[in-house]
Image: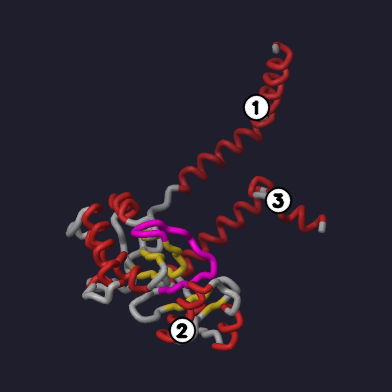
Amino acid sequence: MSQMNEQRERGPKDMETGERMAALTGAKMDALGHKARGERETAEAARWTIGPSEVEALIHDWPEAPKTAAKQILEQYGPPNEATPTKLFWYGNGPWKRTLVTRDIVTHNFPTSHSDFITNSIDYQVPVELFDEIAAFDGSCLVDRTSGVVAARCDTEAANIITLNLMHEIVTGQVTVEQARQKYVDETAAFAMGRSAPYAERLLFEVPRGDTADPDHGMLAGAMAKQAAGKVRDLVTGGDRVTRDTDGAGGAGGAAAG
């Protein structure tokens, strides 16, 4: 038990310099390997499926709303590719890059009080300058700049389709945030009442297939060189020790003065 506690309490600050450098180097080499193979990302789990009986056992004790949603998606898309006691994952199902259904919910009050537990993802690049607009439109429209993925999280697939259609219209300048929010309300009400609601029925734009990632650009090499030079200087001059001693003296002096 004490060993487990020590492992839990050991944080990033406790890592030796060699461990930190090894982690940094390993991640860099891994990224270079993926780049050489032309891989933007990996999804090994997409190769597998979970048996229906195992899924049924996992969701047996889920709350009613997410359990019902999980069963509907199972009927529509077949068994998931991954499953845990609290999550089901599908990859490449229908128009989606990923679908996630969770036992745990997030409460959400727009356009009315409900629970979010279905997340549908697509490849899509949102310009950085429009991130605030997307967040203002719907806090459950989730933008991942690095991987180039946008997801919508709600209680039905139809609601997520509405979200993504209106997200696209904001990005392409067809509607303002206020117009998009009102359109969301109108389409949701129409869909619930069984009336025509085209924004809820399918994605109304061509969904990109890859090439949406924004891995940003490297800045660390120069900073690492600067830090390495500083570390050498500290070793030569004892600057690190002097700084600590000075801080200690200042603290003692301050206490004595007080």
Q: Earlier in the sequence, mark 3 or mark 1?
A: 3
Q: Residue 74 bears which disc, if any?
A: 2
What quarter of the picture does the N terminus occupy? bottom right
Say if mark 1 contacts mark 2, CB within 8 Å: no
Label the magenta part by its dominant secondary structure: strand
Classify mark 3: residues with Cα within 10 Å, few (<14), some (14-19) or many (20+): few
Q: Give the amino acid at mark 1.
A: Thr
Q: Please tell me whether residue 3 belongs to the stretch shown in magenta.
A: no
Q: Which residue is mark 3?
A: 10
Q: Give the amino acid at mark 3.
A: Arg
> Which residue ends up furthest to the right in the rendered image?
2
Q: Position of residue 40 (x, y in %)?
A: 41, 69
The residue lying toward the viewer, choosing from 102 and 186, is 186
Q: Earlier in the sequence, mark 1 or mark 2?
A: 2
- Residue at the (32%, 49%) spot, across then down: 132
Q: Give the alpha-carbon distance from disc 2 to disc 3, as whole Å.
A: 42 Å
Q: How is the image coloured?
A: secondary structure
Quadrant position of residue 234? top right
- Residue at the (69%, 21%) spot, across then down: 251
Q: Give the alpha-carbon distance from disc 1 to disc 2, as whole Å.
A: 62 Å
What's drawn in magenta, residue-wise?
Answer: 98-113
- Residue at the (31%, 70%) spot, across then down: 161
Q: Is residue 229 above or below residue 63?
A: above
Q: Is residue 226 above or below residue 207?
A: above
> Which residue ends up furthest to the left in the rendered image?
174
- The residue tagged with tag 1: helix, strand or loop? helix
Q: Is residue 59 left or right of residue 153?
A: right
- The residue tagged with tag 2: helix, strand or loop? helix
- Residue at the (56%, 88%) spot, across then down: 51
Which numbered disc, 2 or 3, marks the residue closer to the eye? 2
Q: Residue 243 bears which disc, if any?
A: 1
Q: Give the amino acid at mark 2.
A: Leu
